[in-house]
Amino acid sequence: MNKKIFLSSPTINGSEMQYIKEAFDTNWIAPLGKNVDRFEQEVTDYLGDGYGAALCSGTAALHLAIKLAGIGAGDIVLCSSLTFAASANPITYEQGIPVFVDSERDTWNMDPRALEKALQTYPNAKAVVMVHLYGTPGKVKEIMELCNKYHIPLIEDAAESFGAKYQGKYTGTFGRYAILSFNGNKIITTSGGGMLITKTNEEADRARYFATQARMPERHYEHTEIGYNYRMSNIVAGIGRGQLKSLNDFIEKKKRIRKVYKELLQDIQSIHLNPYDEKISEPNFWLSCITINDDSNVLPLDIITSLEDDQIESRPIWKPMHIQPVYKENDFIQIAEGVSVAEDIYNHGVCLPADVKITATDMLRIINIIRNLFHKKSISLSMVERILDA
């Protein structure tokens, strides 16, 4: 049986252990300690902006962003539809109401035209949650202009895009708030964890306060607000500090993986890679995704099952939030009538393996399975090696 090829699994570089050992040696294994403080600083140093609060998940970070933005019962929050549920669920934690916004073709991210329509429909909306899908930056300039025009904060969901750039600046540094995820499948991992990025140290402190059960600075346990157990542990932060050293290398490897798909599937005219604007953005290429034209006899499920039969993991594109049963009553804003852009991408898309540990032999298996489905000639290992190992 062939070895299992994962979509995007953790890749350990070895330096994580020095920080974990230090935490054990100093007995700082709780949600406090040097690693947590340093990890927050090292992440914001990398981004070149903002203040970080290290938390137990990206979802927790988004929840606290929603809370800091003042979202309450009945407040409208405009949110990308083509995303994972964790982008929308925290809005409901504070009893806000998500209104979902369609994607555009250029990046698969929130369509500024649809957002403008949404803001005209809901002029009292309290925030915008924009996702940088699969590591590709959205149209930040246009989104920011609309947020400024309507005087509402932008919350960047950069869970999938840590290390990606838009106009030379990292995603996660544009919005009033931003969140990162360090889940096991992300470009760097802490096994589980996330970070809230704020514009002021005061807001980062406020997030840390909520994340430690909103405990007041008293000798006894005093609580005047509801808090949460959201802080990242010193052990987990140590893993993150070690992982951060490899972020740029991981991005470069994922870039080459995408290049393999691009060059060795380009003769299949029915296949299109997830797009981005090369002039103004530099994705982190977290996942390489494709869509398949309707005129093809090959369906996304054909690719998924054929890969699965050979122990290769792939997945459908995120099912848009506006067609999820849990959000069936929520409003959805799109430009054109009929099937939305987000739903169309979902119907035709597949996420292909982009694991940092992937080898040329692994990629040969993936590429040739896809090529065979489209009745194309198999390619050789040397053709993959030329690109992947360049």
Image (tube, rainbow, N blue to C red):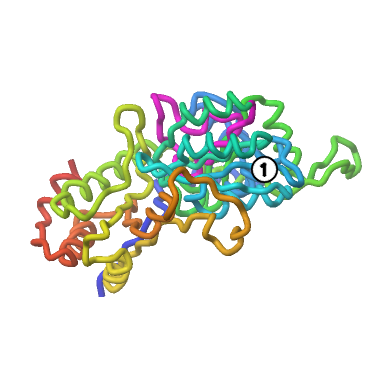
x and y percent of residue 222 in the render?
A: 89, 42
- Which span of residues is magenta-colored? 151-177
Q: Decide if residue 390 is in sight here.
A: yes
Q: Give me the residue at 38% from left, 60% from top.
A: 347
Q: Where does the N terminus fall, quadrant-wise?
A: bottom left
Q: In the image, what residue occupies the spot 44% across and 42% down? A: 109
Q: Say which residue appears at 59% left-offset and 35% top-offset.
A: 119
Instruction: Residue 285: name its quadrant.
Output: top left
Looking at this view, is 260 or 273 the one in front? 273
- The amino acid at mark 1 is Ile
Q: Residue furthest front?
A: 337
- Residue 293 position, x and y percent, is 26, 56
Q: Is residue 64 left or right of residue 346?
A: right
Percent position of residue 33, x then y: 66, 39
Q: Is residue 245 left or right of residue 354?
A: right
The residue at which mark 1 appears reads as 76
Q: Magenta stretch: dominant SS?
A: loop
In the image, taking residue 205 as reference, residue 387 lies left or right, namely left
Is residue 159 located in the magenta-colored stretch of the structure? yes
